[in-house]
Structure formats: structure tokens, C-alpha cells
Image (cartoon, rainbow, N blue to C red):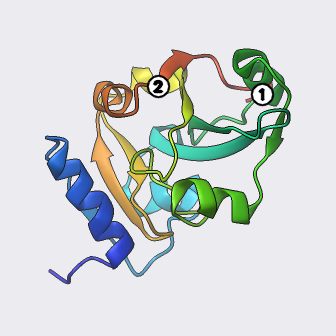
Amino acid sequence: MSPLSPSSQKVQDLLLSLGYDCQVQESTTTTRTASDAAALVGCHVGQIVKSLIFKGSITSKPILVLASGANRVNEHLISTYAAEPILRADPDFVRATTGYAIGGVPPIGHLQPMETYLDEDLIQYSAIWAAAGTPNSLFKLTPGELQKMTAGKVTKVKDQLS
């Protein structure tokens, strides 16, 4: 097995240090989109965890939404939970707050603490897959593990059209 890239190794080391036996997998195929990731690992697109970063428009606080790959996030709901309007974070803000580029943001190991919301639709699955630091790396975990490792609030995040 080839060694992991530095970003993916960082995620792997963090998982192990937190007591999780999840194994980061890297591929030469992109996992940048939920559809790409699901095709690679052979699961339903809903089992892919999208790590989406938003920015509080008043406080500039980073807000992490861990959404099912099948869902579109209702930004109005997230604004309500965050108690302020939110903006989609630009790539520079994402990198500055997480340490990772868009398309590979893992749910853990960020440079700044984040208010975190976990899509209730992920709870139905026995296994889910999350990004692991690069646009071509993932790790498998359970929804319970995701909630525990992120301390995310399980809530409705999807748009009614999802």
C-alpha cells in the first residue's frame, strides 16, 4: 500500500489519536463530489458526508455543516441555528479556518473550532464516508462516530427540494 499524502496522513493520525480505527483510503480517482465519492466506494450518494463551511456574516465565525451527499443545504435553516445570517465561505476562508482546500475538508482536525451541524439524514445509515484531507481521500465511519468526534448537533439541514 502506498503511503498517504501529508494531508491524508494528518487526518489518519488524528483519527488514531482520538481512538478511532478508521482507515483513510486514497485513490487516483477524484472524490471531490458526493457522486464521485459514492461511485468510488460503491455506496449510496446519501452515505457521503459533505463538509460544507459557512461564515457568519456578523461574527465571521466558521460554521461546519456535515450534510448527506444526497441533500442540498437550506442556508436559511443554518442561519437560524447560528443566530445570524450566513455566507458561503470562499476558498481562502475555508483554507484559513480548516487547513484544507475545498473538496477535501475532513469533519475533524480544523485550525479553528467550529459550530457544527450534522444532517439528521446521515443517522439512517450503518456506514458513511467522509473526506480525509484531499479531493481523493475518504474514510469510513458510523454516524455515531461522526457525531461523537465532531460534537455536531444532529438536526435538519436539507432544503425541502432535496
Q: Position of residue 135 (x, y in %)?
A: 51, 69
Image position of 69 (left or right of 61): left
Q: Where is residue 50 in the image (x, y as percent from the top left)?
A: 56, 45
Q: Quickly name the residue at label 1.
A: 74
Secondary structure at numbered mark 1:
loop
Q: Which of marks 2 and 1 is in front?
A: 2
Q: Compared to 155, does 146 lie above or below?
A: below
State the residue at coordinates (38%, 71%).
7
Image position of 16 (left or right of 8): left
Cα–Cα gap, marks 2 and 1: 17 Å
Q: In terms of depth relative to the viewer, which is nearer, 90 or 58? A: 58
Q: Position of residue 63 (x, y in %)?
A: 64, 36
Q: Residues within 10 Å of mark 1 (few under 14, many from 20)?
A: some
Whether residues under marks 2 and 1 lie with C-beta atoms below 8 angstroms apart, the answer is no
Q: Quickly name the residue at label 2.
A: 152
Image position of 88 (left or right of 25): right
